[in-house]
Amino acid sequence: MNEDKPEPQTPLIDNPALTEYYRKWAKKWRDARETARYDGDFYRYEQARKECNNYASKLPENERQEFWQD
């Protein structure tokens, strides 16, 4: 019985177009987060922070720090 292992799938993050998509949205949410912060709107700030972190988590490790905020 020949047990060939299936070819490992390339992680989605190795897709340059998908990485660019996540980077674009992380930037938009980062800008929205900063705007809400300066406006003093905590609710919008928290929403934007969560969305920005969500998109940033899908970026390569070396790019996350630019967008991530606890």
Image (cartoon, rainbow, N blue to C red):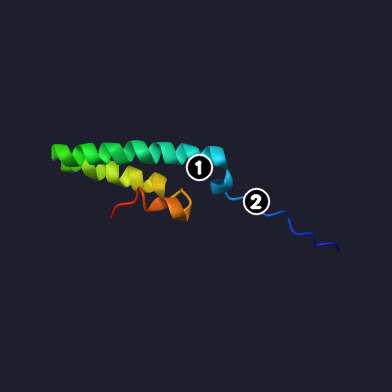
Query: Image point 20% across, 38% down: which residue?
Result: 36
Which residue ends up furthest to the right in the rendered image?
1
| Residue bearing the label numbered 1 | 19
Instruction: From the viewer's perspective, tell me whether residue 5 is left or right of residue 39.
Output: right
Q: Tag count in the figure?
A: 2
Crowd rating for badge 2 (residues with CA inside 10 Å; few <14, some 14–19, many 20+): few
Q: CA distance from mark 1 to mark 2?
A: 16 Å
Instruction: From the viewer's perspective, tell me whether residue 62 is left or right of residue 4.
Output: left
Query: Image point 47% across, 37% down: which residue?
Result: 21
Crowd rating for badge 1 (residues with CA inside 10 Å; few <14, some 14–19, many 20+): some
Is disc 2 placed on a helix, strand or loop?
A: loop
Q: Amino acid at mark 2?
A: Gln
Displayed quadrant of residue 24: top left
Q: Nearer the viewer, mark 1 or mark 2?
A: 1
Q: Quadrant of the N terminus?
A: bottom right
Numbered circle sitting on residue 49: none
> Is mark 1 in CB contact (under 8 Å) with mark 2?
no
Measured as percent of width and height from the top left, residue 30 is found at: 31, 41
Is disc 1 placed on a helix, strand or loop?
A: helix
Query: Image point 16% across, 39% down: which residue?
Result: 38
| Residue bearing the label numbered 2 | 9
Sooner in the amino-acid sequence: mark 1 or mark 2: 2
Measured as percent of width and height from the top left, residue 8 is found at: 67, 54
Measured as percent of width and height from the top left, residue 29 is found at: 32, 39
Q: Quadrant of the C terminus?
A: bottom left
Measured as percent of width and height from the top left, residue 41 is found at: 15, 39
Q: Amino acid at mark 1?
A: Thr
Displayed quadrant of residue 25: top left
Which residue ends up furthest to the left in the rendered image?
40
Instruction: From the viewer's perspective, tell me whether residue 16 is left or right of residue 48.
Output: right
Instruction: From the viewer's perspective, tell me whether residue 22 is left or right of residue 5.
Output: left
